[in-house]
Every structure is written in structure tokens, then in C-alpha cells.
Image (cartoon, rainbow, N blue to C red):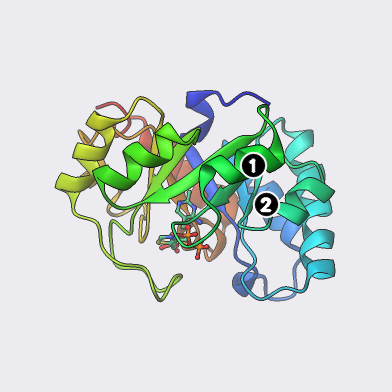
Amino acid sequence: MKLDRESLLLYAVTDRAWLHGRKLAEDVEKALLGGATFVQLREKDASFEEFLEQAQEVKKVCKKYNVPFVINDNIEVALAVNADGIHVGQSDMEAGSVREKLGKDKIIGVSTRTVEEALLAQERGADYLGVGAMFQTSTKLDAADVTFEELKAICAAVEIPVVAIGGISNHNVAELGGTGIDGVAVVSAIFAAEDIRKATSEMKQNLESVVKA
Ligand SMILES: Cc1ncc(COP(=O)(O)OP(=O)(O)O)c(N)n1
Ligand SMILES: Cc1ncsc1CCOP(=O)(O)O
């Protein structure tokens, strides 16, 4: 699947911490009904079998809504379920090696926090960049802040699309206007919400004035 820049507008990153007994695929479907345009399955503590099972279920629902589905970090799981791609961080495998393993048609996203990292990831074949944390987050405890100036500089330096991540909510998303981002990636603003569909659709509306503003 070739990456379409617009599909990064509202990027939902999963977190099973908020399920309260529901199935992840159910909550992902609510986000998709609310207008999420891209989904990443992020599992930090799952066994391979558990990760695989979640991936199969979430992939099915993403396919139903024709939304790209990528796996956080785990190439074996991405290959096993034939996901649309993978998202890797700076401490994971670099984009060039990921490309060799996944082939030219898969989407590769890379986390970057500086212009230097961003240019290198682009050169090595990344299809998009995730930049953050832009605001304080309790979802990723080891996340370090990125300034708005650095985000702007990254957007101006690369040709590939950029999504901002980290602590983004319906209350602060407007602050990202004018930075040059193509979209936002969110975990808790969607998956911790009482009404996931409503929170997603509000975020989608708020994004209209933010992206490329
Ligand atoms: C879209 C997007 N951007 C950044 C990240 C963070 O990735 P990483 O730095 O590898 O950290 P973990 O998610 O693995 O904790 C992301 N997942 N998605
Ligand atoms: C995965 C990740 N990478 C940088 S911050 C972050 C967590 C984003 O979660 P939230 O949207 O709940 O702040």
C-alpha cells in the first residue's frame, strides 16, 4: 500500500490500558467511525502470540474501513499479518534495514526529534515521521519534549509527511496550527475517552484548521 499524505490526518495509536474489559478491535472500530484515518497497533508488554492475535483482529477492522494499519516496532508481527507497514523509533531498527525486510510497498514510519534525525530517516527510506512529545504525556513515560520550533524546522526540512505526537488533546491541538504538520497521532485523547467515537470526531473537526494552516 502506497502512503497517501492525507491518510495521516488523524492517526490513532492503540493502548489496551483503557479497555475496561472491551475488545481492542471494538474500540478501534469506534475510532474509525469517528473519523480516524490511520491506525498503529502499539503493544509494549504483549507476548508474540498475544501481539499477533490483536494484530489479526485490528487489521480486520481497519480493512473494513479501508484505513492503513501499521505495527509498532515488531517486524515479525507485521510480516505475519501482512500489515500495511511498521513504525519504528530511534532505538529500534533503522529505516534502511526495515525496508530490506518489508519490501518497497510497505509503509515505514520513524520517530524523530531533531532535523538531523529527520533528514537521515528520510534518506534511509522512511515514508513519514512521527515527531514528539509535543506536550506532556503520561502514556509514554520515557518520552522527551520536542519544541514547536524544532517541529517547524523538521516540517520545513523534509519532503515526507510529518505527524506530531505526545499529549495532544482536543484542548491543545489548535496550538499546532502553522507548524506544517500533516496530522496528529494520539493515544489517550481517543482511547481513554468515555465516548471514543465522539472524541475522535471532535478531534477531526479541530484538525481542519490546524493542518497546513
Ligand atoms: C506516529 C508515532 N510517532 C512516534 C512514536 C513513538 O515511537 P518510539 O519512539 O519507538 O516509542 P514507542 O512507541 O515504541 O514507545 C509512535 N509510536 N508513533
Ligand atoms: C507513543 C508516544 N511517542 C511520543 S509521545 C507518545 C505517547 C502519546 O500518547 P498520548 O497521545 O496519550 O499522549
Q: How many marks?
A: 2
Q: Which mark is residue 32?
A: 1
Q: Looking at this view, is 123 or 183 the one in front? A: 123
**Percent position (x, y) of residue 205?**
41, 35
At x 27% / y 53%, what residue is drawn?
172
Image quarter (top left, top right, bottom left or bottom right) of the N terminus: top right
Question: Is residue 168 shown left or right of residue 175?
Answer: right
- Disc 2 marks which residue? 28
Q: Are marks 2 and 1 in contact (CB under 8 Å)?
A: yes
Residue nearest the viewer, comparing 154 with 191 = 154
Q: Residue 54 carries which label?
A: none
Quadrant (top left/top right/bottom left/bottom right) for the C terminus: top left
- Taking depth in this image into account, of 191 and 128 the one nearest to the observer is 128
**x and y percentages locating residue 111 in the rendered image:** 43, 51
Type of amino acid at the residue the image marks with label 2: Val
Please state if 170 lies on the left or on the right of 45 as rendered: left
Question: Element at badge 1?
Answer: helix
Dot 2, how many residues are within 10 Å of its Cα: few (below 14), some (14-19), or many (20+)?
many
Local secondary structure at mark 2: helix
Looking at the rendered structure, the kind of residue marked 1 is Leu
